[in-house]
Structure formats: structure tokens, C-alpha cells
């Protein structure tokens, strides 16, 4: 390995396959043109930091690096590893590929931007960044990792730190993209912090919903001509009885599969919801419900609405991205949202999982939908009213609650959700 890009860490040999592969992964994922005079130094520095955060084996070398660029980075690495912040970050980046990769990529981007601004002059090719620049690059990367960690806790899978499957759409690239978007949104960090706090303190519960299946628990008996579903004894009858049953129907088992059910949430994003803590509280609760659903294997269906209903979301990435980044604006049409939700619940798949709509709104609209929520409809409506009152909604709601915009109010809603 040439002297001009010697690694600053011990424990993970620079000549090892895992180091080389990680270096190439960083280059592919960062997707930027690296400064030609500093490219190898930047890639090596970023790879060192990946392993410093990811692996408990990696330590910073004590001997001076002869390369001026790499020595500047080594000095800062030596300093941060003794800080309390580094130890806290490493607690959740260790063995977490997504977060370690995210840190290194953001550090690489910042360092590369600086290298291009400070092109070498007078034949000096070292182009070494000063300590202030490296410090800012590392601090910026740390802030993004903190945000990404909060997002990852919401979209938590059964393989912490690993890639969530393509079906759920939260790769390293997706996490980087979502983190970058969330960093630009006011209160996104507060929404995530409150949501995760609620998740930590709320009771773990779920109500099991029943859906039909050919396998599962016995729910009763019924008449059927499908031989595969009949009781064994029915096939051992004398011929005259067998042929009679073939015409009139055999006795079969009715089986049902226990499934955890789902949540269906409508969230008001009208302009009036931007006032005070309405947005912060409502979106934190929506994320907390999402995380509960995810941890218990429940589906989570989510729609924003203002003067019209927006797309129905179900994938983890889309749900979290929209809750964190979509602005509150426009007017309000609660009836439009509810009518769309009722149509959604006519879908056989959703209907088998839930018959309840949870709507979170400040109620600034007229609602006259008693004909849509008759008893025979069997659709339940849980209304969460935020600093408002709506007589029309109250008349059609199974549960109607005036939310306190604090932790206790959030937990009260989650307690109501136990009955869903």
C-alpha cells in the first residue's frame, strides 16, 4: 500500500479483503466526483472511520502518519475516541452497517467538498485539511447519525443494523436520503425524540384479529363439496350415504388463522394543524402507533388529508418519510377523508384486518355522515380531537377524545388503541 494513503487504524489490516471491499462500497454509495489530488486519502480516512464506529477491534494508531493529510485525520480520530460523545455513538453504531456507513459517507462528502475548495497551490500536492475542517466534517456526520439512529429505531426490523429487505425499502441509500430530508425539516428531531420516548414507556400490547384461512384454529363446522376440507370420517361412509353427501355437501372444518390485525390512521395536515404543538404531537403519536404495529407484526395503513385525501401508504419508508417531511398546509375536508377511508375498508384484505379508523384532527370542518356510520355498517371510528370540537364527528365516533398535547395525552390515545 503506498505511503501516501496509509491507514490510521490497527485491528483491521488495510490489506485485508474486508477493508478493500468496504472502501469500494463507500465509493460506490457516495456517488460523487472525488477531488483527484485527495481521492485516495479521503477514501482511506472514511474507511478507517467506518471500522472505528462499526468494529470493536479497530483502534487508532499512536504513531505519526507520514502523510500530512492522513496525519491531520489521525489526530482528530485520536481525540474523538476519548470523548463521551464517541462512546455514546459507538453504543449504537457498533455492528450496525447502516449507521457506520452513513457516518463515513457524510464525512467523505464534507471532506471532499473542502478539498475541492482548497485546491493545491504552488506545486504543493498535500492539500491537507486543517483540524477545524476535520472537526466540522465529523460533527456534521455525527448529527446525521443521531438523526438516522432515531429514524432507525422507528423503522426497526428483526435484524438491527442489517439491510431491511427491498420490499420494505430501507437500504443504506434510503436511510441516507431520508436523514438528509429530515435534517432540513423543522421539528423533525423533536417528532422522532417524542415518538421514541412514547415507544419506550408505553405498554406492549396488541389485540389479535381473526381472518379466514385453510390452516389455523378450528372455528366450527360447515357444509362443503370440497373434498380437501371434509372430515376424514365423512369419506368412510357407506356408498349410499357418501353419494348423498356428494350431492348435498359433506361436513367440513371451518378454520381461521389468528393474525395481529392492523391500524388505519387518518392524519390532518391542514394549515391550522401547524399552530402550536399540534404537528409535533400528532405526528409523534402517528409514528409511535406505526412502531407498535411494526413490533407486533401488524399492518399500518396511513393517509394524510387536507382539503382532499392523499395517497394511502403502507411501506415503512413511505410512512416515516411522509410523516417527517410533508408540510402542514391547505384547507380541511374531513368528510372527503372519511369517505375514502370507508372505501379502503371495503377492500377484502384490509377489512379482514381491521374495521376501525383512527382520525387525528383539530376538527375545523363540518361533518354530516351519520348515514355512513350506522350500526349495520360495523365500522368503528376513533376520533382524536386536537384543541378543537366537532359535533358532527362526535355523533359518529365510537370513541371521541380531546387530546392533551403531552405524553399523558399520547398514552391515553394509545390506551384507547388497545381496543382496536
Image (cartoon, rainbow, N blue to C red):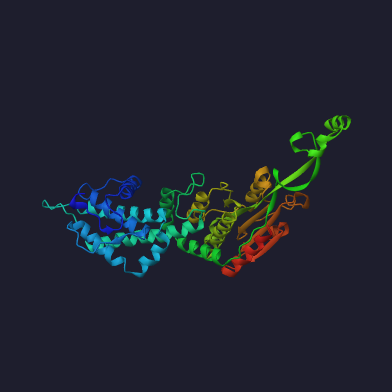
Residue 124 horizontal side relative to residue 17, left or right: left
Q: Does 320 sit left or right of 125 as displayed?
A: right
Whether 5 is drawn above or below 138: the answer is: above
Question: Exactly how many numbered labels are in the figure?
Answer: 0
Query: What's the residue at 34%, 56% (across, down)?
Result: 51
Q: The C terminus lies in which quarter of the figure?
A: bottom right
Residue 268 x/y as whole percent: 58, 56
Residue extending farthest to the right is: 240
Q: Is residue 189 above or below residue 375?
A: below
Residue 152: x and y in percent read: 47, 56
Q: Nearer the viewer, residue 372 or 163?
A: 163
Is residue 129 in sight in this rendering? no
Residue drawn at point x = 32 percent, y = 59 percent: 58
In depth, the one of 161 and 330 nearer the eye is 161
Return the residue found at the far left. 122
Residue 181 seen: yes
Horizontal and vertical percent for residue 148?
A: 43, 57
Name the quadrant containing residue 72.
Answer: bottom left
Amino acid at each position: 500500500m503506498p505511503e501516501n494513503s496509509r491507514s490510521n487504524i490497527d485491528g483491521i489490516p488495510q490489506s485485508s479483503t474486508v477493508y478493500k471491499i468496504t472502501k469500494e462500497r463507500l465509493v460506490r454509495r457516495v456517488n460523487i466526483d472525488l477531488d483527484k489530488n485527495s481521492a485516495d486519502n479521503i477514501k482511506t480516512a472514511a474507511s478507517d472511520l467506518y471500522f472505528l464506529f462499526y468494529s470493536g477491534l479497530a483502534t487508532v494508531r499512536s504513531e505519526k502518519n507520514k502523510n500530512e493529510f492522513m496525519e491531520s485525520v489521525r489526530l482528530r480520530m485520536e481525540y474523538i475516541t476519548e470523548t463521551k460523545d464517541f462512546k455514546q455513538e459507538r453504543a449504537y453504531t457498533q455492528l450496525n452497517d447502516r449507521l457506520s456507513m452513513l457516518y463515513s459517507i457524510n464525512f467523505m462528502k464534507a471532506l471532499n467538498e473542502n478539498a475541492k475548495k482548497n485546491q493545491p497551490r504552488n506545486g504543493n500536492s498535500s492539500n491537507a485539511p486543517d483540524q477545524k475542517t476535520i472537526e466540522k466534517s465529523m460533527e456534521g456526520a455525527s448529527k446525521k447519525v443521531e438523526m438516522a439512529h432515531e429514524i432507525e429505531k422507528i423503522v426497526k426490523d428483526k435484524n438491527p443494523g442489517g439491510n431491511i429487505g427491498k420490499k420494505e425499502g430501507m437500504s443504506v441509500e434510503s436511510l441516507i436520503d431520508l436523514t438528509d430530508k429530515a435534517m432540513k425539516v423543522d421539528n423533525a428531531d423533536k417528532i422522532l425524540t417524542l415518538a421514541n420516548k412514547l415507544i419506550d414507556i408505553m405498554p406492549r400490547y396488541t389485540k389479535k384479529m381473526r381472518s379466514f384461512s385453510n390452516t389455523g384454529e378450528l372455528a366450527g363446522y360447515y357444509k362443503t363439496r370440497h373434498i380437501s376440507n371434509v372430515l376424514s370420517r365423512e369419506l368412510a361412509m357407506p356408498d349410499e350415504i357418501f353419494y348423498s353427501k356428494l350431492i348435498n355437501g359433506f361436513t367440513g372444518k371451518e378454520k381461521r388463522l389468528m393474525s395481529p390485525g392492523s391500524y388505519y390512521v387518518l392524519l390532518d395536515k391542514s394549515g391550522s394543524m401547524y399552530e402550536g404543538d399540534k404537528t409535533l404531537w400528532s405526528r409523534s403519536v402517528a409514528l409511535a402507533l406505526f412502531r407498535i404495529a411494526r413490533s407486533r407484526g401488524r399492518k399500518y395503513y396511513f393517509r394524510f388529508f387536507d382539503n382532499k385525501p392523499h395517497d394511502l401508504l403502507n411501506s415503512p419508508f413511505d410512512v416515516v418519510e411522509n410523516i417527517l417531511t410533508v408540510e402542514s398546509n391547505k384547507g380541511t375536508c374531513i368528510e372527503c377523508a372519511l369517505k375514502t377511508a370507508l372505501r379502503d375498508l371495503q377492500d377484502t384484505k384490509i377489512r379482514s384486518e381491521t374495521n376501525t379508523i383512527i382520525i387525528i384532527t383539530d376538527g375545523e370542518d363540518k361533518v354530516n355522515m351519520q348515514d355512513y356510520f350506522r350500526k349495520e355498517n360495523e365500522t368503528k371510528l376513533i376520533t382524536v380531537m386536537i384543541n378543537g370540537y366537532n359535533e358532527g364527528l362526535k355523533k359518529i365516533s365510537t370513541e371521541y377524545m380531546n387530546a392533551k398535547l403531552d405524553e399523558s395525552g399520547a398514552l391515553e390515545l394509545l390506551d384507547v388503541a388497545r381496543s382496536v
